Amino acid sequence: SLVELDLSGNLIRKIHRYMFSGLISLQKLFLSNNFIEEIDLDAFGIELSKLNRIQLNHNRLRTLKDSQFYNLKSLEYIYLQYNYIESINSKIFNGLFKLSYVSLSLNNIKIIHIEKNSNIKIDFFNLRQNFLTSLENFTFTGLECKNLNLYSNRIDFIDKNAFEKLIDTESLILDKNR
């Protein structure tokens, strides 16, 4: 039974629905350095319930659908850096209760929207080198995050309540902004 699958460095453009069906023991999936532009909503089906690491870095993703990774109940690490993602909605993390590391660095993120009752717990949330310009009131409401990295964005405005509802933060990196 397959535990690790490395499809990095191929010419994959789309992750199709049920592309990984039957891989019930899969724990690590590497899809880096492809040309992935789209992921079907059911691409990561319920059969991948043991998957704890997915690498989608260095691709061409622009958007992530709500509940994109919902079936990945064991997911701990997700690497999405070096894509073209423009916004983040907390619904992409729905159902990911074991998630501890999220890297969305080096994308084109301009907007972060985290729902009030998201209850997202992440040890390390990396948003460095994106295009965030402001952090509005309660931007991080519903996020429990030990380490939040906002290094080298374009932030020139931080509302006084931007971090008020951010829970259990030990490290907040904001250097090299405007």
Image (cartoon, rainbow, N blue to C red):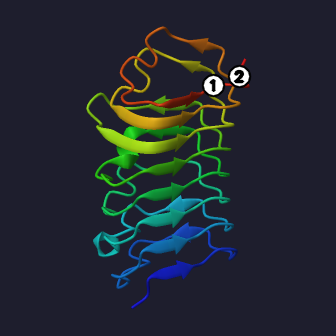
Label annotation for residue 102: none
| Residue at image point 41% right, 58% down | 76
Q: Residue furthest front?
A: 170
Quadrant of the rendered image containing residue 144: top left
Q: Amino acid at mark 2?
A: Asn
Looking at the rendering, in which quadrant would you find the C terminus? top right
| Residue at image point 62% right, 27% down | 132
Image location (x, y in percent) of residue 150? 60, 31
Position of residue 3 relative to residue 27, above or below, is below
In the rendered image, which residue does mark 1 sit on? 174
Circle 2 Cα neighbour tier, 10 Å, few/some/many (<14 / 14–19 / ≥20):
some
CB atoms of marks 1 and 2 within 8 Å: yes
124 left or right of 84 in image: left
In the rendered image, which residue does mark 2 sit on? 177
2 left or right of 55 in image: left
Image location (x, y in percent) of residue 69? 38, 58
Nearer to us of marks 1 and 2 is: 1
Circle 1 Cα neighbour tier, 10 Å, few/some/many (<14 / 14–19 / ≥20):
some
Image location (x, y in percent) of residue 170? 47, 31
Q: Secondary structure at mark 1?
A: loop
In this rendered view, identify the residue nearer to me: 20 or 81: 81
